Image (cartoon, helix red, strand yellow):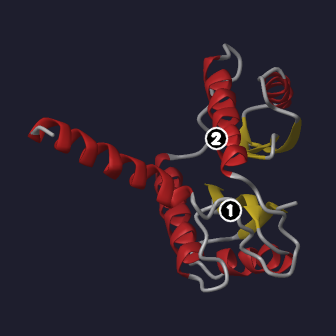
Amino acid sequence: MTKLAHRFTFTAAIAACVLIVPLSGCNQSKDTTGTAAPTTIGNEIDDAVVTTRVKSALLSDEYVKSLDIKVETRKGDVMLSGFADNQAQIDRSILVTKSVLGAKNVDNKLSLKEGKQSVGNKIDDGVITASVKTAMIKDPLMKSMEVSVVTRKSEVQLSGFVDSDLQFNHAVEVAKGVEGVTSVVNNLRVKK
């Protein structure tokens, strides 16, 4: 075999490992109590595709055009969370999401923005969001990057999917423990 063929084979093997190894645990439940049903690698990929399609549709929609909306998908169920300017924008976001191929159900957890936000508020909210995400990752019970965090005027909104009721409740306590957080809205769902 030529050096080029060896290099190609080696590169292909490395690429396969990089892609397969992180996904190898995707079809296993993290919770031993049986509350979280296992997902397959195929489910994970399908959900990622649906999430991308929904985000793209929301960004390209003339009325919505929002980066303030978080989108998460689990087994075709799409959760929208974050903040919208008005009720019509929330309604339009739901309608756009329902029209996306692969979106089975839409769980609306969007909140209305209240009042104008100053540049200082936006910076403070960014710091709070980063601190809450860090606390979620460091917490031994949570260890989660699957929890989305959005902050507006020191109000933290948690969304996404967790493995158990224990994590569902504990996430609020973790967020409340972060300096600057005035309130927490828990829009998390326990995986089915």
Query: Is 174 above or below relative to 156?
Result: below
Query: Is 122 above or below relative to 102?
Result: below
Q: Which mark is residue 156?
A: 1
Task: Give the amino acid type for the residue marked by disc 2 in the picture.
Answer: Ala
Q: Is residue 48 visible?
A: yes
Give how far across and how far down residue 132 sits, in percent.
57, 70
The residue carrying mark 2 is 48
Q: Distance of mark 2 from mark 1, alpha carbons?
A: 25 Å
Query: Is 143 above or below relative to 56?
Result: below
Rendered-image quadrant of the N terminus: top left
Task: Give the amino acid type for the residue marked by disc 1 in the picture.
Answer: Val
What is the number of callouts on the image?
2
Rendered-image quadrant of the C terminus: bottom right
Crowd band around label 1 with a 10 angstrom C-alpha radius: few (<14), some (14–19), many (20+): many
Residue at the spot 85% in from the left edge and 31% down from the top edge: 87
Front one among 88 and 61: 61
Give how far across and how far down residue 149 sits, in percent.
63, 58
Side of 26 where 127 appears, left or right: left
Crowd band around label 2 with a 10 angstrom C-alpha radius: few (<14), some (14–19), many (20+): some
* Residue furthest to the bottom: 140
Choose the circle earlier in sequence order: 2 or 1: 2
Q: Are marks 2 and 1 in contact (CB under 8 Å)?
A: no
Residue at the spot 81% in from the left edge and 32% down from the top edge: 103
Which element type, helix, strand or loop, lies under badge 1? strand
Residue at the spot 76% in from the left edge and 80% down from the top edge: 170
* Residue furthest to the top: 62
Which element type, helix, strand or loop, lies under badge 2? helix
Side of 170 where 5 appears, left or right: left
